[in-house]
Amino acid sequence: MNYWLLKTEPDEFSIDDLEKIAPRSERWNGIRNYQARNIIRDEIKIDDLAFIYHSSCKNVGIAGIAKVTRSAYIDEDQFDSNSAYFDIKSNRENPRWYCFDVAFIENFNSIITLKQLKSDLKLLDMVLIKQGRLSIQPVKKKEWDHIITYSN
């Protein structure tokens, strides 16, 4: 099993939105970064766990947990000229973008803030702290286990 951190803007889609549709899954789409695309296409697998991270908001941080319920498949929005995620250079013979499905697992009582994570010496090597901007990031098992202690 792998562990991930998935960034989302809560006014667009939040952990609360995912919880409302539970137990159904939701498509995690609209990723238009090649490094994140490669992670989706090559690494994310069914039953992997992911922190849902709220960004571009007042309370930036980890809001809860989701589980991958379907691994990579073609993001159809890239072919839809009416979609915000349309990509004129993509085609069905050689698609550029992929998505996957996630389901709600847990909504934390309070956000684990970026400030908390950055001040934790055990998380200094975490991709979130070092690289920051990537919308889908790997989380090491030891980092996952440590962060989970914040939610208790």
Image (cartoon, grey):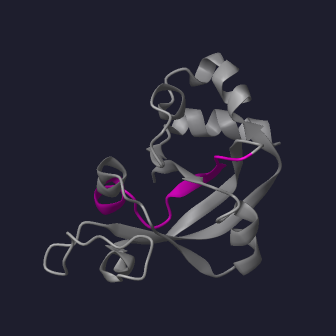
Image coordinates of residue 77 in percent, x first then y, are: 39, 78
Residue lying at the far left in this picture: please name it: 93
Depicted 21 relative to depicted 108: above or below = below
Q: How many marks?
A: 0
Depicted 145 relative to depicted 25: above or below = above
Inspect the magenta stretch and tell me whether residue 136 lies in it: no
Nearest to the observer: residue 8 or residue 43: 8
Residue in view at x 59 percent, y 78 percent = 25
**Left or right: 113 with respect to 3?**
right
Residue in view at x 45 percent, y 43 percent = 134
Image coordinates of residue 13 in percent, x first then y, are: 65, 65
Q: Quadrant of the C terminus?
A: top right
**Left or right: 98 with respect to 46?**
left
Q: Which residues are magenta?
A: 39-57
Image coordinates of residue 110 in percent, x first then y, are: 84, 46
Residue in view at x 75 percent, y 39 percent = 112
Residue 15 is drawn in which quadrant? bottom right
Residue lying at the far top in this picture: please name it: 121
**Left or right: 152 with respect to 125?**
right
Q: Could one spot residue 87 in this view of the protein? A: yes
Depicted 20 relative to depicted 109: above or below = below
Nearest to the observer: residue 128 or residue 88: 88
Nearest to the observer: residue 3 or residue 73: 73
